[in-house]
Amino acid sequence: MTVTEDAATVAPAKEVGQARRRKEDARLITGRTTWTDNMVLPGMLHMSVLRSPVAHARITHLDVGAAQERPNVVAVLTGRDLAEEQGSIPCAWPVTPDMVNPGHPSVAVDQVNHVGEAVALVIARSRTAAADALEAIDIDYESLPVVLDMEEAVTGGADLVHGHTESNTSFHWVFDAGEAGTGADTEQAFAEADVVVSRRFVQQRLIPAFMEPRSVVVQPSGDNFTLWSSTQIPHILRVMLAMVTGIPEHKLRVIAPDVGGGFGGKLQVNPEEVLCLLAARRLGKPVKWTETRSESLMSAHHGRDQIQYIDIAADREGNVKGLRCRILADMGAYLRLVTPGVPVLGAFMFVGIYKFPAYRFECDGVFTNKVPTDAYRGAGRPEATFAIERIMDELAVELGMDPLELRRKNWIDAAEFPFTTAAGLEYDSGDYEAATQQALQLLGYDELRAEQQRRRESGDPVQLGIGFSTFTEMCGLAPSRVLGSLSYGAGGWESASIRMLPTGKVEVVAGTTPHGQGHETAWSQIVADQLGVPFEDVEVLHGDTAVSSRGMDTYGSRSLVVGGTAVVKAAEKVVAKARTIAAHMLEASEDDLEFTGGKFSVRGTPGASVGIQEVALAVFASHDYPEGIEPTIDAEATFDPENFSFPPGTHICAMEVDTETGFVKIRKYASVDDVGTIVNPLIVEGQVHGGLAQGIAQALYEEAIYDADGNLTTGTFVDYLVPSAADLPHFDTGNTVHAAPGNPLGAKGVGEAGCIASTPAVVNAALDAVRHLGVTDIRMPLTPERVWRAIHQGGDGGDRATAGSNAYGGAQTETTAGVSTPASALGGDK
Amino acid sequence: MIPAAFDYARPSTVEEALQVIAEGGDDVKVLAGGQSLIPVMRLRLAAPELVVDLTRIPELRGVREDGDALVVGAMTTHSDVLTDPLLARYGQLLVQATETVADRQVRHRGTFGGALAHADPAGDLPAVALALDAEFVLAGPSGRRTVPATEFFVDYLTTALEEGELLVEIRLPKLGEDWGVRYEKFNRVAQAWSIVAVAAAVRREGGRIAEARIGLTNMGSTPLRATATEQALLGADVSLEAVTAAAALAADGTSPSSDLNAQADYRQHLARVLTRRALAAATGL
């Protein structure tokens, strides 16, 4: 057989860009994997947690004697038992030097500060024995005044969540473009503006509601401990648990096996992870804890929960002149891992894609008697994007301008990149006009506008509205130096290594840790291209600190743009090392070798070639290799990005509003996102769909509601409404592609974009449908009742009744959501 | 979400079931489809000592004709209801309402009789049974008795079933081709309970309404009849005006609860709007 030069130079099909089905899906979807709760170890004990049914109280009496006598109970531990060793749940983001952190015990010692806080632990030989024994614990509380409303909590003389602090304010954080040198003086801009529009927006509290509940198993072995956890952050967790418990870091191994979703909700050092570890250390036996769904909803961290006072200044022609944001951010009762950092991350995105000459942002972190808030898909950027995209619509109404025309007048033009905003970020690339044109076409904009007009003129009970969200976001967390300047406690680099096995197969060891993202598939595609090996020959290892020793884990749409880049750089090093060996094997100069399709060949010498997989075998044998080098072609790389990644896009929602009932229904949804070079279109579309579902859910369905006593009345999925596919429309999605300049893949993050962009598009659409009826705002979620009240009674739809629904006997109960008093939803408004 | 320990019995005849229940002490719960009982046990809202499972009693399952009535076995599942030929012909109101119950998985386990005996005011089927003047056949240690729907639903989650009794059959009138029906359900997401729903059945004679039966879901602690609307419709023209005027009376005399889905005044408003829509659909307007 003759190999022609032509055949050799035909480039093999690229893996990057192919819609590969995810190689991990079969085992994830069928459950044929070891989730943390599937772990069974010899002699393993089970932990159950007694949780406070009251929001704010002193523990006056706690007797665990009867519980200790229950069958199969091994130990009952209280906050007093663990007070000396439990330390505090760490907060890694002290956003200001004077930030007040009251400390966060994993199990309450003498005071509880939110419903659901741990007050005692039962460790028993079976899960049911542990759960049964909780009933035998005798505990009395002396009630303290409950602090729930942020606006009240920051007034003088307000009751305090933490009696030893001076106020309920944890920190006051300011960014002022004038002072930072990134913009003009904001006060002056407002003083000179023709038009100022001010609004108060409410970002309701949300619950991440990951599919797999949290679960932890700890196995002690001598003075070593292995901890399995359904976590997004095994590497960070290891460092933090070592610091909190005093167990030396090298004696602690953390493993995140397959993890069923997180959405930021598993970016945490959970109290129960600490407690499981302490219990296992004390008892010398393996201990498992798996939460119930009720526990998850009331004690895993929540998200969002801001009150936003937004002022925008413009001239009569619609040129924006300044933006001023004052934010109250609900911390909940304690500061967890990045609680204070969430609104601070958002601070840089309030200016959106617009060329504001002046910008000022102020935020107060406020304590309340609720479960702490922390990262939830988008973490700060959805809040910011909502505020700017809503206020742009309000300004358009004030000016009598088309909302899209106002946006176009003020957004950054494609030719202006890179562009430094008033918030000081350098946006890398984008073409907002191109994305918008494509989205308008996908939606069928002109026809829907005509239908809207017809419905309006005929007084149709079902009105139609169209809402825009033209956005970008900052992701790919993050340049370590920037994190340092924001006082974050860690860096934002990522690490990867590549091991070439003797048979030519490849192991990629990544510091990123997936919980549903499809890393095994995407990383395999990248490495297949880089090394010229078959996709099937690549195995991806991650989520175990003993296997992948260095990593910053997965959150903030960082895995591909930071971790994927580390994989590329490791592969480049492998190729460079292999080139030296190959040259030796081919008796050629390295400079004469070219590397394509996994083969090193000698330029101008047909047939003289060796594959990188053959080099791997040669190096394994190491019988003959050049002098002065190590006999390995394995390599490791760490990548620290110089900038964030900024994926922009245009989302347009068409919404039907039934004015008789207030029921809203998405008629059509079109989104065009620019996530740079797409590694796997199937994964990208999946991320966009999931993000849209969660963003739409914030707009229409989800809200964590506390009653006047601080009981979480949305304590089950009966009342905390997570939509299903049946409730969501078809999504018309598209992409524009502008390769990101900041990484060799040209990729931008996609994990959060859909969630960040969609919420304001949906609310703007609903308002557009009924604005002619005098409606100017509707609080999220847009329940039918709120929409109906806003239309027929004015205002923003108001507060909802706090009682849970009566379905199957009332899903919220004393056991799931606290005790009944005249003020509570249980005894009050129901 | 872990229930307290309980004993379990699975009889194979009604007689055996009644005996097990009679001997079971004070704290017995009957498991039909388990779609409400299991969740409340997992939440420890209920902690019975004995659970008597009826799923293996064949005589309780199925639909038959008895003269002018349809007799539905209490353990007939929702999914059986949706595929039954007799119900397809004479029981469209029940079929329509059953289609809206929860999701496919729940409909395969949940039963018609279980839903009625649980008497959740947010459940869809009690209002249908009430609107149709269903008769409830209860079996007890001293024999069988028949209770009309108006007496069966007593209060919130409370029925005329005495201790030791089982609901075994539900008798529904056959609705012929002169009847039009509609179950109009209002909820926020597909698998959720009704915030309010209206079950309407209307019989036409000539151009007039000869009979109207309207059941309301979740407008009080039990299912209710919209009697003022029913009366206003008697003899009325089949017209949008007449239907709209009658529907405006749908919430009269109700005092629904307030919860995070709806406060009482909004529920009453919904009852009026949904009744108008249900009637319009049932009369083909």
Image (tube, rainbow, N blue to C red):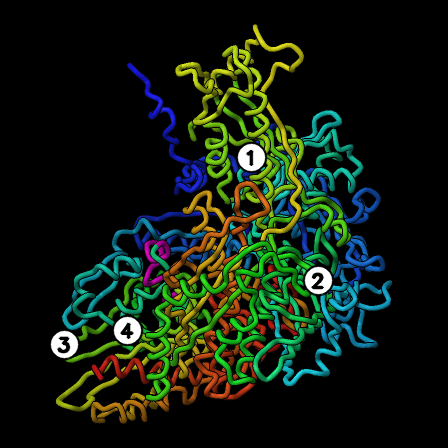
Against A195, is A544 above or below?
Answer: above
* Camera-side residue of A141 and B19: A141
Left or right, A576 with respect to A766, comes to right
Against A137, is A680 above or below?
Answer: above
Residue A533 visible here? no
The residue labelled by disc 1 is A568
- The numbered mark at residue A332 is 2
Circle nearer the N terminus (1, 2): 2
Q: Residue at 84% across / 65% down in the picture?
A: A163
The residue labelled by disc 4 is B134
Q: Which residue is outermost to the front?
A: A604
* Camera-side residue of A190 and B81: A190
Against A780, is A455 above or below?
Answer: below
Question: What's the magenta region?
Answer: B105-117
Gap between marks 3 and 1 measured at Cα: 71 Å
Residue A40 visible here? yes
The quarter in which the N terminus of chain A is drawn is top left
- The numbered mark at residue B177 is 3
Left or right, A719 with respect to B130, comes to right
Judge the density around disc 2: few (<14), some (14-19), many (≥20) Cα neighbours within 10 Å.
many
Q: Residue at 68% across / 45% down in the picture?
A: A492
Amino acid type assigned to the residue bearing label 3 in the image: Glu
